[in-house]
Image (tube, rainbow, N blue to C red):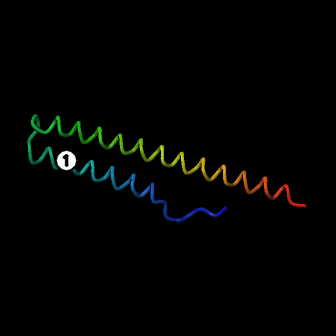
Amino acid sequence: MAHKTFDTLRALAIGSQALGFILIITLETVMGGEAARPWQGVTLGAMVAFALALAVARLYRRNKARKAMARRLAEHDDEP
């Protein structure tokens, strides 16, 4: 089975992490040290939650593809 050259979930993961780190640095620059800390924590929590959601989506896609492949192999074995 050929693999796609562009993985949407991977691009979303990289983009969201980059955006999160840029936001954390921007908060530090704009708000200052102590005022930015709670918002940086919220941003980091959102980054982790998004990464976990993408990991679950990747697992779901992989299992779905694995089941489809098993079904195709089972159908192929049943043919004379």
Q: Quadrant of the C terminus?
A: bottom right
Classify residue 44 as left or right of residue 59: left
Q: Mark 1 points at which residue?
A: 25
Residue at 62% x, 53% y: name it: 65
Residue at 72% x, 53% y: name it: 71
Instruction: Pick whichever, 13 or 59, lies toward us.
Output: 59
The quarter holding residue 11 reads: bottom left
Residue at 26% x, 48% y: name it: 21
Residue at 79% x, 56% y: name it: 75
Q: Position of residue 23 (x, y in %)?
A: 21, 49
Q: Position of residue 7 (x, y in %)?
A: 49, 60
Classify residue 34 as left or right of residue 67: left
The quarter holding residue 33 reads: top left
Classify residue 22 as left or right of residue 5: left
Q: Where is residue 40 in the image (x, y as percent from the top left)?
A: 20, 39
Vertically, is 50 above or below 11? above
Vertically, is 73 above or below 49? below
**Amino acid type at image mark 1:** Ile
How dense is the environment of label 1, judged by Cα within 10 Å: few (below 14), some, or many (20 and up)? few
Classify residue 74 as left or right of residue 80: left
The quarter holding residue 1 reads: bottom right
Local SS, label 1 = helix
Q: Where is residue 78 in the image (x, y as percent from the top left)?
A: 85, 55
